[in-house]
Structure formats: C-alpha cells, structure tokens
Image: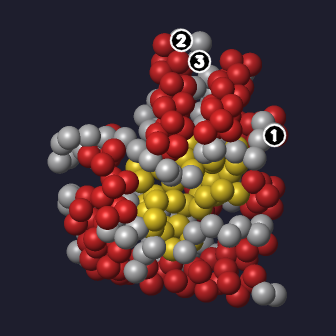
C-alpha cells in the first residue's frame, strides 16, 4: 500500500485534492486533523469532512496527524497543558468515530523534559486508546529523550512509533532509530532532506540513503503503508497533478527497495 500526506500544498478543495491523489495511483491518505496552517481555507470545518470525501474518492485513511501548535505544553501544570491533553483525547475519540486506526503525535521537545504530570497524561491517553482500539504513534523530531522515555515507560500495544525520515536525518542522524524502536513501528513519514527547509522534499531529491533506510524498515517487519510526507515548497513549478505523479513514482521506488529486502 502507498499513501501520502493529504495537505501536501496547493490551495484546492478537498474533493479535487483526493481525486487527484487517487488518479495518481495512491491507495490512501494521511489526514491533517486541524484547521491550522490555513487548512480550513474553504471554510466549514473542512478537515472533519475529509474522511468521507477521501473514502468517496476510493482512498483508505491510514492515520491522522494531531495538531502541533501547542505540543510543548503537554507536560505543563496549567490550562494550556490541560487543553493539549484534551485535544489528544478528543483525537483518540475522533479516530474511533471516523474509523481511522492510528493517530500521530508530536511530544514536547528536548527543552521540555517529561515529568510525572506528563507521564500521567500520556497514561490517560493510553487508557482511552486501549478502550477505543486506536493506535497512538509518537513521531521523532528534536524530542528523543521524551520519545525514549514514553516508549520505555508505557507498555501498551496501542502506543508506538512513527518514523520520520527527514526529521531523523536532520536532527539525529547518528541515532539508529529504526533498530531501537522498530518493534513499535506504527507509521512512516518518508521525505528527503533537501530544499529550502532541508526537509519534506520528494524522496531521491536529497542526500538520504534510501537503500539503507528501506532495508532497516523491512528488517522491523513493518507491514504498513509506504507513506510519503513531502511538500511542494520547492516544486512550485509543478502543478498539483504533476507533483502527485512524481511523488507516486518515488513511492514506488521506495516500495521496491523495501520489498527487495523482505526476501533476503
């Protein structure tokens, strides 16, 4: 299965967006679960209508990405901390209601080390995820200490790891994240480390060693989708249709590398 992050750029309505994604060859999408970053540019709480529109286009919904604007407040003993916790709890409920198996979460960064309150909040999220049958995948950014602590302290089949290749090579290339957390792998964000933002480029346009990356993913036994999280930031000369076709071609190359290592 090959999927793509649905909000890859371009101001186009969801119905057209998902039709273009399907026509390019993708099997499914990763949904941005918020009206932040201009997502709701067409009004009407559009992101919550995304699941129905995507499914009407014949797309599988692999996961949602939870809001990120206040992620560093998760450990704080204040109203912001409670609000972020409530947001994540609501995302668990939304996944169950919309029949979406997994949600991806950013933990606070290294400047905000986890505390007892933070761990208690993660346990609340875990309990709800277990009750509703939803996977919660913690994504690697500049948050390795918090990520390690949560995965070590929370022994639940519903709490796992979202591997982001671009964040890995930008923030902690010397850490073998897939070997360390591969047994907890629940989701992928695959993009290259090129372009003006040094991330979220199309695979094979940067310096990422994709042969090694896909080999390590294959070694984890991961059977989920090859998921592209590229943006059009440095591809403005391409139409949305052209960008998606190029992204699908790159995803097929990644899938072939993964498959070639599964049978070694």
Crowding near the residue tagged with mark 3, few <14, some 14–19, many ≥20 C-alpha atoms within 10 Å: some
Q: Secondary structure at mark 1?
A: loop
- The residue closer to the viewer here, 198 or 64, is 64
> Compared with residue 252, is residue 129 higher up or lower down, i.e. above or below?
above
Residue 10 at x, y percent in the picture: 24, 61
Q: How many marks?
A: 3
Seen in the image, is 86 located left or right of residue 17?
Answer: right
Q: Residue at x 74, y 37 (%)?
A: 150
Could you tell me how far apart the alpha carbons at marks 3 and 2 are, in whole angstroms?
Answer: 6 Å
Residue 78 location, x and y as percent? 53, 11
Find numbered disc 2 in the image and state the secondary structure of the residue it sits on: loop
Identify residue for label 3. 76
Going by the picture, which residue comes out furthest to the left? Answer: 42
Name the residue: 28% across, 71% down: 19
In the displayed structure image, the side of residue 35 where residue 134 appears, left or right: right
Please state the horizontal and vertical placement of residue 86, each as a whole percent of the image.
Answer: 51, 25
Q: Quadrant of the N terminus?
A: bottom right
Image point 70% across, 57% down: which residue? Answer: 185
Q: Are marks 2 and 1 in contact (CB under 8 Å)?
A: no
Residue 119 shows in the view: yes
Give the quadrant of residue 11: bottom left
Q: Is residue 78 above or below residue 250?
A: above
Note whether 21 is above or below 101 in the view shown.
below
Q: Earlier in the sequence, mark 1 or mark 3?
A: 3
Judged from this view, the residue extending furthest toward the top is 78
Q: Give the residue at mark 2.
A: 78
Left-right relation of 182 to 237: right
- Structural distance between the alpha carbons of marks 2 and 1: 27 Å
Q: Which residue is mark 1?
A: 155
């Amino acid at each position: 299965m090959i999927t793509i992050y649905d909000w890859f750029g371009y101001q186009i309505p969801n119905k057209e967006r998902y039709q273009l994604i399907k026509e390019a060859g993708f099997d499914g999408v990763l949904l941005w679960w918020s009206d932040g970053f201009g997502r709701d540019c067409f009004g009407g709480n559009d992101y919550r209508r995304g699941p129905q529109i995507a499914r009407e286009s014949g797309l599988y919904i692999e996961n949602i990405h939870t809001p990120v604007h206040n992620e560093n407040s998760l450990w704080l003993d204040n109203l912001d901390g409670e609000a972020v916790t409530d947001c994540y709890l609501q995302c668990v409920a939304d996944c169950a209601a919309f029949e979406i198996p997994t949600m991806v979460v950013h933990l606070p960064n290294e400047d905000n080390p986890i505390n007892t309150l933070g761990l208690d909040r993660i346990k609340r999220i875990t309990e709800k995820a277990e009750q509703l049958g939803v996977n919660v995948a913690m994504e690697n950014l500049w948050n390795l200490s918090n990520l390690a602590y949560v995965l070590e302290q929370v022994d639940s089949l519903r709490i796992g790891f979202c591997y982001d290749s671009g964040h890995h090579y930008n923030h902690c290339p010397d850490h073998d994240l897939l070997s360390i957390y591969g047994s907890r792998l629940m989701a992928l964000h695959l993009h290259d480390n090129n372009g003006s933002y040094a991330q979220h480029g199309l695979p094979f346009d940067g310096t990422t060693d994709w042969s090694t990356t896909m080999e390590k993913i294959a070694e984890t036994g991961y059977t989920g989708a090859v998921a592209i999280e590229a943006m059009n930031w440095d591809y403005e000369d391409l139409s949305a249709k052209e960008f998606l076709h190029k992204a699908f071609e790159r995803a097929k190359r990644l899938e072939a590398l993964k498959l070639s290592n599964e049978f070694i």
